[in-house]
Amino acid sequence: MVIFTTTTDFDLLEQVLENGTSGYLLKDVDSFSLTSALKAVMKGGFFLHPKIARTVVSLLQERNASANSENAYHQTAVRSPYHLLSWREVEVLQLLGEGHSNKRLAELLYISDKTVKNHIAAILRKMGVRDRTQAVVKALKKGWIELK
């Protein structure tokens, strides 16, 4: 889903991202950026309007600095890695963390075993890890998934 809006309100951006939005564009977007955004989202990626991207980076840097000053072992919320993984890859990663097999993932997500394997291969490549266990451990450490 792509959101077109006139607001640069970070709280709204955060809310729509948590609800699975893959694109956030301001209504003054140029045609090249619009085309790029739609292509990225259709391929399972994400796109932020350039004007809002600067704000997001600044706010994330502030949050990171604040988090670093707190206890490193205290996690207040699960953070979403949409800068790196698609929403579907995050979903697969969460289910991997819950210990599901590829066959069970396929059943739960209503996709083929081959598609599950493709998602896992993409996750491993994007996260720079060798196997699913390393991916889950890294995701847990970064707060991208949580154990249920």
Image (tube, rainbow, N blue to C red):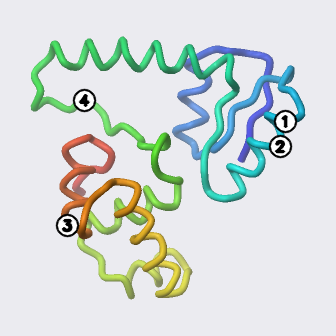
**Residue 5: image location, x then y, percent:** 79, 24
Q: What residue is shown at x 60% (from left), y 50% (from top)? A: 45
Q: Which of the two discs, 3 and 4, sits closer to the camera?
A: 3
Q: Pointer 3 and pointer 1: residues touching (CB < 8 Å)? A: no
Q: Residue 133 shows which numbered tag?
A: 3
Q: Classify residue 35 by image quadrant.
A: top right
Q: Classify residue 8 by image quadrant.
A: top right
How far is disc 3 from disc 4 in space, using C-alphas?
A: 23 Å
Which secondary structure, mark 4? loop
For the residue pair 97 and 116, the one nearer the viewer reads as 116
Q: Which residue is mark 1?
A: 32
Q: Pointer 2 and pointer 1: residues touching (CB < 8 Å)? A: yes
How far is disc 2 from disc 1 in space, using C-alphas?
A: 5 Å
Q: What residue is shown at x 44% (from left), y 60% (from top)? A: 91
Q: What residue is shown at x 35% (from left), y 66% (from top)? A: 95
Under mark 3, the amino acid is: Thr
Quadrant where the C terminus sits is bottom left
Q: Which residue is mark 2?
A: 35
Looking at the image, residue 1 lies above or below residue 90:
above
Q: Which of the two discs, 4 and 2, sits closer to the camera?
A: 2
Under mark 1, the amino acid is: Phe
Under mark 2, the amino acid is: Thr
Q: Pointer 4 and pointer 2: residues touching (CB < 8 Å)? A: no
Q: Which residue is mark 4?
A: 76
How far is disc 3 from disc 2 in space, using C-alphas?
A: 37 Å
For the residue pair 134 and 8, the one nearer the viewer reads as 134
Looking at the image, residue 62 lies above or below residue 111:
above
Which secondary structure, mark 1? helix
